[in-house]
Amino acid sequence: MYEYKGELCPVIKISKMTGVPYGALLRRLNEKHWSLEKAIETPIRKQKHPEHHTCILDGKIVGVEKVARRFNLNSQSVRRRINRGETLQDVVNNPVRRRTGGKPRIHLEYKGRIYSVRELSEQYNISIATIRTRLSKGWSVEKIVETPVKHTKLYDYEGKKYTARELYDMLGSKVSWDICKNRLRYGWSIERAISKPCCRRRRKQNTVVDIDRHFGC
């Protein structure tokens, strides 16, 4: 509340009485800590808007956007260059082309032939993700192609085949997925690894030890 013209008024009421925008008035009082008189009497600065350029194209006056579309240029780039003092003729004759996005194309040579990652994937039945992962590890193209891909083990359940994770999610379990994976590494059946609850033992000071997690039992 501020005293204005002999009465206590909220900021929003003072804004309506003086015509000063509420947001600007609030910012001046709270953030800039101006006095009420200064906040009211200081004129609001007008925001500068970018210049709207027009050009003559095919005998017609058109905007920058149409010129940019006609010559396959970026309209913001055209406007920025004109603002710097370049003529429209210079902008059109010396364009700054749009850069194409995406990763650079990778070429891989194997047995005297050049492949892209996709072509190598299709030719040797290796997933693109596997090829890129192996490249990131510094593998040669020969090692990438000739090293067998480890396939995920499938388990039979009610006449259908599932991965361990699919069965874990489908059947539900009271143990974590990490414990289930450890049990499978120790040779447990998938049903036992998922369904058997953890064996817990108590130590001194009520410390609970997960025997299954540490010993796979």
Image (tube, rainbow, N blue to C red):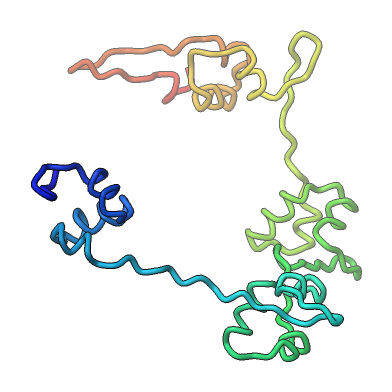
Q: Is residue 109 above or below residue 147?
A: below
Q: Nearer the viewer, residue 128 or 14?
A: 14
Asked where in the image residue 203 lies, by quadrant, the reply is top left
Asked where in the image residue 99 lies, by quadrant, the reply is bottom right
Q: Nearer the viewer, residue 217 or 9?
A: 9
Q: Is residue 200 above or below residue 39?
A: above
Q: Residue 10: where, in percent of width, then height?
A: 19, 42
Q: Residue at x 75, y 36 (%)?
A: 151
Q: Is residue 92 left or right of residue 181?
A: right
Q: Residue at x 12, y 50 (%)?
A: 5
Q: Residue at x 64, y 60 (%)?
A: 136
Q: Residue 171: where, in percent of width, then height?
A: 62, 12
Quadrant location of the N terminus in the rendered image? top left
Asked where in the image residue 170 lies, by quadrant, the reply is top right
Please state the total of marks drawn on the protein image.
0
Q: Residue 150: where, in percent of width, then height?
A: 73, 40
Q: Residue at x 21, y 61 (%)?
A: 39
Q: Nearer the viewer, residue 138 or 128?
A: 128
Q: Residue 201: where, in percent of width, then height?
A: 32, 12
Q: Is residue 94 above or below residue 141?
A: below
Q: Is residue 214 above or below residue 95?
A: above
